[in-house]
Image: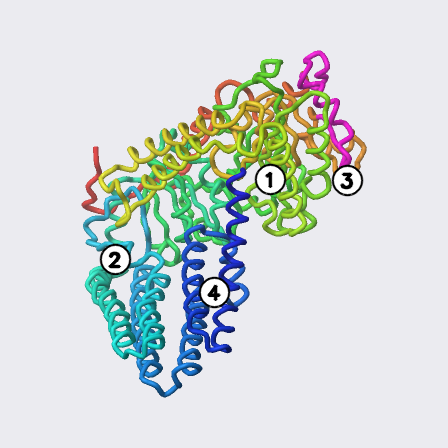
């Protein structure tokens, strides 16, 4: 946590140095001061380099304020020409050579960028991208080497350094050779980089036609014969939404049926977790319509989105809405779900939510399959498991609109954290907010930052500034993160090009388990945690906790599987009975108002089982929300898929084209 604060402070200092260096260069031109200009120019280059290497959020603010990378280099170059005019005369040799060098550099940079843009455009016009299928027969060549592609704008812009140095040296010494050599070096570097890029770019442009690509894909799919598809599309492409798909991967891998994942946006493939399941990403609807999956009879949808219709139109397929969590939010009982053949819910609670919507879905459309993802959760033993009672505060986000703003972070987050910190029983706090917290509401973002600051300050008070920031553990975690990144990389950047997806997936999951174990052991057992990264996962946090405090969200429904006590915020001040009736997950919860009244009762239940009056209700609620203990949810999920697949075959028997060779 301390390292993030230091990184933020460092980013601010570097940005201040960058801005001051440009102010200094402008002053140097006005004062015709060569030493001042040279010093400020050097500081500006160094600040730029440090700022980009630190990947500071300040970069986005600079871009938004029209002071982005390209603009900074252009301003510096114009200031150099201004200095030439102020000291040497605008018609002097140094000014002319500098102008010619900058123009040639600009032309070569333009050509380099245009060529890369053309390569990317043509590659993006391929009808699909894939993972886990053998498409070597298409002969698609690799993209140019990452050194030529990654951050190419930064690299080509910095080629003006020899020219900048040569011009300043000529102004200082009145020797024409320096600017000449600098100009030649700059132009030569830019030309050489373009020369190196061209053959790789030409190679990458040797692409199959759309028909050839789709024919080969259909051939591979005929060999694999997928039977069930997980279909996902989302307009707002972000890694924060991919949990909707990633949560189902292991359950899909355990099915008897042969699964495939169908994505619609190219960027989503980058954020898809490691899996042994074949994946195809098909952006265009007309190309998706041409993809043949003769045995496909079940399609699973974790989200409601407009482009679902492109798969829904397949009449031979049974379409199922599986959602991405089970909660009392409106999204968990959406009227739009009536377009699906079936809706799979965790337990009776999911069925009741839909049946409360008059004429939306029929009773037979709803199937209770449990929540296969919850198998790793530890059960409540009736006592605090660790060295200190641990409360996890896991609020939801502010939603798309104010009407769907269920988060407690804004009205009650700070009050809750302060109350927990002030409690007579010392308590460890794990703060695990929804990944999108603060993405729509500035007020939520500010409250979120204040909660983090409170926990960091309390850790610093109890353990010192550096006790919760183990450098050794940080280095080990960084190495594991790098290993996961290397394993996740595919194509020309991959360090493990020969790994199968099964092997890659197994290694990544082992590395994540190692990282989670190291995370919890890295700082004192009683220190607070702010968990905003992917590791540790939410369920790891559940296993570390003795009490959950949350909002109306699927997080609460999942936590019920542990049978541990939990509390929910009743932010609208409804009478307890009315709130519990409206929010079924609140049936067995302790209730808190915005002032956190009721918190002491929930904490007493955590500390003393005799005070836990909600324990028997949690047993009832668990079965109501998540279904019976036996058969396990994984078995029920698999059985539901098999049953629907058989029905799909009865309605639409598999028909194979003549001369189709099927594997045994």
> Which tag, 1 or 2, sits closer to the chain's start?
2
Q: Quadrant of the C terminus?
A: top left
| Pick the front one: 521 or 292 | 521
Q: Quadrant of the N terminus?
A: top right
| Pick the front one: 183 or 38 | 38
Q: Which residue is mark 1?
A: 332
Residue 35 appearing in the image: yes
| Label 3: how many Cα within 10 Å (few below 14, some 14–19, many 20+) | few
Q: Quadrant of residue 109?
A: bottom left
Residue 117: x %, y % from top left? 33, 65
Residue 476: x %, y % from top left? 39, 32
Q: CA distance from mark 3 to mark 1?
A: 20 Å
Q: Which residue is mark 3?
A: 572
User: In the image, which residues are magenta?
Assistant: 590-615
> Which tag, 4 or 1, sits closer to the chain's start?
4
Mark drawn on residue 144: 2
Q: Which residue is mark 4?
A: 68
Q: Which-is-in-front pick, marks 3 and 2?
A: 2
| Label 2: how many Cα within 10 Å (few below 14, some 14–19, many 20+) | many
Q: What residue appears at the point 48 percent right and 19 percent down from the top-left corner? A: 631
> Which tag, 2 or 4, sits closer to the chain's start?
4
Question: Which secondary structure lies at badge 3?
Answer: loop
């Amino acid at each position: 946590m301390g390292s993030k604060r230091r990184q933020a402070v460092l980013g601010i200092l570097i940005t201040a140095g960058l801005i001051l260096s440009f102010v200094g260069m402008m002053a140097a031109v006005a004062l015709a001061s060569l030493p001042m200009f040279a010093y400020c120019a050097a500081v500006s280059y160094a600040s730029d380099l440090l700022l980009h290497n630190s990947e500071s959020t300040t970069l986005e603010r600079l871009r938004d304020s029209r002071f982005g990378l390209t603009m900074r280099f252009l301003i510096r170059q114009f200031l150099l020409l201004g200095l030439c005019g102020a000291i040497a005369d605008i018609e002097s040799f140094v000014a002319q050579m500098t102008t010619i060098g900058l123009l040639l550099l600009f032309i070569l940079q333009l050509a380099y960028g245009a060529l890369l843009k053309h390569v990317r455009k043509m590659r993006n016009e391929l009808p699909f991208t894939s993972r886990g299928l053998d498409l070597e027969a298409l002969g698609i060549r690799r993209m140019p080497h990452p050194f030529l592609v990654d951050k190419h704008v930064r690299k080509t812009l910095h080629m003006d350094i020899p020219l900048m140095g040569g011009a300043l040296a000529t102004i200082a010494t009145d020797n024409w050779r320096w600017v000449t050599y600098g100009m030649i070096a700059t132009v030569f570097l830019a030309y050489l980089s373009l020369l190196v890029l061209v053959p790789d770019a030409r190679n990458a442009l040797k692409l199959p036609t759309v028909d050839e690509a789709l024919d080969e894909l259909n051939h591979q799919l005929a060999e694999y014969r997928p039977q069930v598809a997980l279909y996902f599309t989302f307009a707002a492409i972000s890694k924060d939404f991919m949990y909707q798909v990633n949560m189902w991967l292991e359950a899909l891998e355990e099915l008897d049926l042969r699964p495939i994942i169908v994505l619609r946006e190219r960027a989503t493939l980058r954020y898809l977790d490691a899996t042994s399941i074949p994946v195809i990403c098909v952006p265009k609807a007309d190309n998706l319509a041409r993809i043949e999956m003769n045995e496909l009879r079940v399609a699973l949808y974790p989200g409601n989105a407009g482009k679902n219709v492109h798969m829904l139109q397949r009449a031979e397929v049974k379409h199922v809405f599986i959602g991405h969590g089970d909660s009392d939010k409106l999204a968990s009982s959406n009227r739009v779900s009536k377009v699906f053949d079936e809706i799979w819910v965790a337990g009776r609670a999911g069925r009741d939510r839909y049946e409360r919507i008059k004429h939306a879905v029929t009773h037979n459309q709803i199937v209770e399959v449990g929540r296969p993802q919850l198998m790793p959760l530890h059960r409540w033993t009736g006592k605090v498991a660790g060295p200190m009672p641990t409360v996890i505060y896991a609020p939801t986000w502010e939603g798309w609109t104010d009407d769907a703003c269920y988060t407690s972070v804004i009205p009650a987050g700070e009050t809750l954290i302060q109350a927990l910190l002030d409690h007579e029983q010392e308590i460890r706090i794990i703060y695990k907010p929804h990944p999108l917290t603060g993405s729509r509401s500035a007020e939520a973002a500010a409250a979120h930052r204040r909660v983090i600051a409170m926990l960091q300050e309390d850790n610093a008070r109890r353990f010192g500034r550096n006790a919760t920031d183990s450098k050794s553990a940080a280095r080990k975690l960084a190495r594991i993160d790098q290993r996961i990144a290397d394993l996740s990389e595919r194509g020309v950047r991959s360090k493990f090009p020969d790994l199968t997806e099964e092997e890659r997936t197994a290694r990544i999951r082992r590395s994540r388990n190692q990282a989670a174990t190291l995370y919890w052991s890295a700082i004192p057992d009683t220190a607070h945690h702010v968990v905003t990264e992917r590791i540790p996962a939410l369920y790891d946090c559940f296993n570390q906790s003795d009490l959950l405090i949350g909002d109306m969200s699927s997080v609460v429904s999942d936590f019920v599987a542990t049978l541990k006590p939990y509390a929910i915020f009743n932010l609208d001040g409804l009478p307890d009975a009315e709130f519990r009736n409206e929010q079924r997950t609140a049936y067995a919860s302790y209730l808190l108002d915005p002032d956190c009244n009721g918190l002491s009762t929930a904490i007493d239940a955590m500390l003393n089982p005799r005070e836990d009056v909600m324990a028997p209700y949690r047993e009832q609620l668990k079965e109501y929300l998540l279904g019976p203990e036996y058969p396990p949810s994984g078995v029920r999920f698999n059985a539901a898929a098999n049953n629907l697949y058989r029905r799909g075959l009865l309605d639409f028997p598999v028909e194979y084209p003549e001369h189709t060779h099927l594997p045994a």
